[in-house]
């Protein structure tokens, strides 16, 4: 691949043009006769001047530097970078979905409403919940929505509950969402295996407990076996349980958050249900609740009277809207297509495959890399660079070296309670051959650490830019290009 | 690991230099080595009060963003503005140039919870982190 680093401005040639415009067929007016002087530039904007072909090559080459699930293995723990079936792209472009307007009258978009209604039913069944809103457009947005629902629930019962308990292993978005929602965060320490410390939880709950936010499997990729006891501790104190669905790819069709005792759930369609992920979205963070919280859901609610679908805005207890219209409809259509294509058995198998693949990676790599939790894992496994520390190699170096072999590195330095963590989530969609090739490279890097640490410490070598000075970039950022 | 004998320490890895009813505070050498290169410090606001154990300063390193918890409570009488433009002094000289603030101690009892240099050394060895 050509390693051009030139910016579009740097390949500009004065006077070159990408497009010949036809002769103007109306009388030309001087610009200062049309626009007041104070709004006119003193000097022309320094726009790039470039031929159409050079322009096309420049951006095509930039686009070829993208890395995604379609170009390679992407074992980014906690992010579930699974393959996005392409049939979903066809389905969401059906004219009945792509050419409707959100302000159309319900009777003219019955099919789109039916899809939203059915999708709510499917997700409710998978989550073990009673009602769903499809409005939130990201996982963290789902968290904020869920916490607002919890706050409304307590408020309507006349209780001032302001504290949200999060384990120290939680996804960073959990305490962040609670803070944005105006709630106070109480952090509790986890046990060494990342499970909830029941003693610490008992000590933390009280009359002011609004909720406990939890993922299961935990952020360490381990199943929280005490979940029923955890739920009863929180419920007895009058609090609610929030399920962060980031790790739901391990449990589809096997266990349900609702049956574990959770009251509010969010799912990331862009993780668990195969819709596009990364690059800033768009995503979809559907939120499910038990019936006791259903009246607070965002408006509108999609209703079905047995013959006709409608939008119900008359919900006096609702927390209001959390997004325009009905969420990211095109993403919801993709997730719907995914669920319909797999069906209940397929969803269960996806989760079983995800768990099997993670355990396969763990079993093949725990000789070369230290496995802090050497036990059956769920959909992701954790290793670290403890065995490589004697050669001066850190997890960051290993991640950078993986780039040389054409892999997106796993999540590193998370969860924060594991030193030098490296979290591998292979997902359900990868073949044994792909996993074996990745495992071979990981083993090769472990050998390189012993024989040629410098090569790893200076990696990556094959990328367009080499090892970046992240400290300098943060301390003295250069944010603007100047000729 | 540099742990000056004349200072007191908190279990959250801050050092405290006590002079009369005033305490100069900063993060320990151990803390800065764990954080890695510090790239931004949100210094506390002068003339505000701080409760012992509450976050009063935010340190951003290449690895993480961390709250710094007040080792003693009281009024912040002086802050180290230099940290805003040159956060690297927190790595280079954590006990000197890299100090964070001077707090007028509200309750001398806060000092009872602080550790001596020997106790702090033992604490970080035992904590194993």
Image (cartoon, coloured by chain):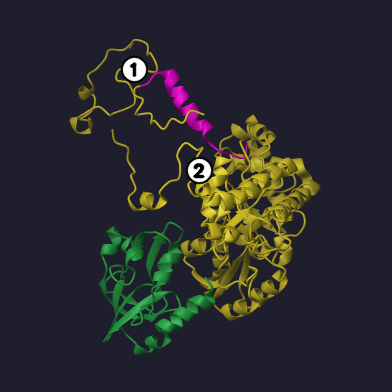
Q: Which chain identifier belongs to the yellow chain?
A: A
Identify the chain of the residue marked 2, using the numbered disc in the image: A
Magenta region includes residue A173: no
Q: For the residue carrying disc 1, how many other residues have a C-alpha within 10 Å: few (<14), some (14-19), or many (20+)?
A: few
First in sequence: mark 1 or mark 2?
1
- Which stretch appears magenta? A50-70
Q: Is residue A464 above or below residue B54?
A: above
The quadrant holding residue B21 is: bottom left
Asked if residue A137 can be seen in this view, the reply is no
Q: Give the Cα distance between marks 1 and 2.
A: 37 Å
Image colour assigned to chain B: green
Identify the chain of the residue marked 1, using the numbered disc in the image: A
* Residue, far front: A451
Residue beneath label 1, please? A16
Q: Are marks 1 and 2 in contact (CB under 8 Å)?
A: no
Residue A259 % position (x, y): 74, 64
Magenta region includes residue A66: yes
């Amino acid at each position: 691949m050509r390693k051009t680093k030139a910016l579009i401005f740097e390949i500009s040639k004065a006077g070159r043009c990408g497009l010949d415009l036809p002769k103007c067929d109306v009388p030309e007016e001087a610009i200062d006769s049309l626009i007041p002087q104070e709004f006119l530039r003193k000097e022309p904007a320094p726009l790039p001047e470039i031929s159409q072909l050079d322009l096309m090559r420049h951006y095509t080459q930039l686009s070829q530097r993208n890395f995604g699930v379609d170009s390679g293995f992407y074992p980014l723990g906690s992010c579930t970078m699974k393959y996005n079936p392409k049939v979903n792209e066809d389905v969401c472009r059906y004219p009945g979905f792509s050419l409707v307007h959100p302000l159309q009258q319900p009777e003219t978009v019955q099919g789109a409403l039916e899809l939203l209604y059915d999708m709510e039913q499917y997700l409710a069944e998978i989550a073990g919940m009673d009602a769903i809103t499809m409005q939130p457009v990201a996982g963290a947005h789902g968290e904020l929505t869920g916490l607002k629902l919890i706050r409304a629930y307590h408020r309507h019962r006349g209780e001032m509950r302001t504290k949200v308990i999060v384990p120290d292993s939680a996804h960073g978005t959990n305490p962040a969402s609670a803070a944005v929602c105006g709630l106070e965060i109480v952090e509790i320490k986890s046990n060494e295996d990342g499970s909830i410390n029941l003693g610490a939880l008992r000590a933390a709950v009280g009359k002011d407990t609004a909720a406990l936010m939890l993922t299961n499997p935990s952020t360490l990729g381990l199943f929280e076996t005490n979940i029923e006891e955890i739920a009863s501790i929180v419920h007895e104190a009058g609090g609610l349980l929030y399920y962060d669905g980031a790790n739901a790819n391990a449990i589809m069709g096997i266990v349900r958050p609702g049956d574990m005792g959770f009251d509010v759930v969010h799912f990331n369609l862009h993780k668990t249900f195969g819709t596009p992920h990364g690059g800033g979205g768009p995503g979809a963070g559907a939120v499910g609740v038990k019936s006791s919280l259903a009246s607070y859901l965002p408006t509108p609610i999609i209703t079905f009277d047995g013959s006709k679908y409608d939008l119900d805005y008359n919900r006096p207890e609702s927390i209001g809207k959390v997004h325009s219209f009905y969420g990211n409809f095109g993403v919801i259509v993709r997730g719907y297509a995914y669920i319909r294509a797999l069906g209940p058995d397929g969803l269960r198998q996806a989760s079983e495959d995800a768990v099997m693949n993670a355990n396969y990676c763990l079993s093949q790599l725990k000789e070369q890399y230290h496995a802090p939790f050497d036990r059956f894992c769920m959909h992701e496994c954790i290793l670290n660079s403890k065995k490589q520390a004697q050669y001066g190699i850190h997890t960051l170096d290993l991640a950078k070296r993986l780039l040389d072999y054409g892999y997106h590195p796993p999540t590193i330095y998370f969860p924060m309670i594991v030193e030098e963590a490296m979290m591998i989530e292979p997902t359900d969609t990868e073949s044994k051959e792909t996993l074996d090739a990745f495992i071979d490279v990981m083993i090769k890097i472990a050998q390189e650490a012993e024989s040629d640490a410098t090569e790893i410490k200076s990696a990556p070598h094959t990328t367009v830019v080499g090892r970046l000075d992240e400290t300098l970039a943060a301390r003295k950022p250069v944010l603007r290009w100047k000729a | 690991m540099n742990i000056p004998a004349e200072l007191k320490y908190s279990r959250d890895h801050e050092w405290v230099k006590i002079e009369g009813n005033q305490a100069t505070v900063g993060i320990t050498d151990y803390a800065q080595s764990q954080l890695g290169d510090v790239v931004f410090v949100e210094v506390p606001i002068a003339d505000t009060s701080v409760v012992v154990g509450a976050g009063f300063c935010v340190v951003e390193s290449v690895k993480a963003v961390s709250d710094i918890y007040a080792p003693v409570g009281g009024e912040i009488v002086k802050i180290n503005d230099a940290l805003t433009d040159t956060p690297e002094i927190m790595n280079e000289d954590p006990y000197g140039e890299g100090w964070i603030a001077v707090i007028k101690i509200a309750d001398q009892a806060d000092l009872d919870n602080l550790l001596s240099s020997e106790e702090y050394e033992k604490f970080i060895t035992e904590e194993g982190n």
